[in-house]
Amino acid sequence: MMIGARIRSCREAKGLSQGQIEERTGLLRCYVSRVENGHTIPSLDTLEKISRALEMPIYQLVYEGDEPPQPALPARRRSSGNPLWGSRGKQAHLLMRLRLLLGQMEPDDRELLFFLAQSLAKHSRPSRTVLPTRKSRADRATAVPESRASS
């Protein structure tokens, strides 16, 4: 259902006119009409004003059920019973850091990184679920390069 039609049906169910909505919200009657007829998409602030004027929770303007919608919870386990990667512990911490870093990237760089991750996931073995950790400087200094180790 379009938001405007939903606002109109709620307003009419409460027995209010567009003029009364104007008085209660401070929004012009012609603006309320434009919203109800689908000519204008209201902002979240406007929806909040209208919901207060209609004396109903804002979710009822955008949701057609009788009860508030239940929040979608991410699945914590695969069908095999194993926890999903990133759902707890160090993996969850790493995932949180990755989200923060992705938020600081340019959109084109995020697209490139996503493409690279898809390609790596497509070509990697399924049993490989643990990411390598960064070696400390001391570990890197003492490590013998593979070309020298084989000679």
Image (cartoon, helix red, strand yellow):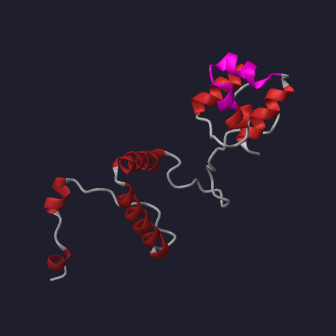
Q: Could one spot residue 67 in this view of the protein? A: no
Image position of 115 with respect to 138: above or below: below
Q: Nearer the viewer, residue 110 or 48?
A: 48
The image quarter containing residue 17 is top right
On the rendered structure, is 31 left or right of 115?
Answer: right
Image position of 51 with respect to 82: above or below: above
> Picture coordinates of residue 124 (x, y %)?
45, 73
Which range is magenta? Answer: 16-32
Instruction: Please tell me whether the stretch drawn in magenta is mainly helix, strand or loop.
Output: helix
At x 39% / y 51%, what residue is drawn?
102
> Picture coordinates of residue 116 (x, y %)?
40, 68
Q: Nearer the viewer, residue 104 or 45?
A: 45
Q: Which residue is outermost to the bottom?
A: 151
Q: Which residue is outermost to the top?
A: 23
At x 73% / y 44%, what residue is drawn?
2
At x 58% / y 35%, what residue is drawn?
43
The image quarter containing residue 59 is top right
Quarter that holds the N terminus: top right
At x 61% / y 49%, what residue is drawn?
76
> Picture coordinates of residue 33 (x, y %)?
71, 33
On the rendered structure, is 57 left or right of 131?
Answer: right
On the rendered structure, is 64 left or right of 26?
Answer: right
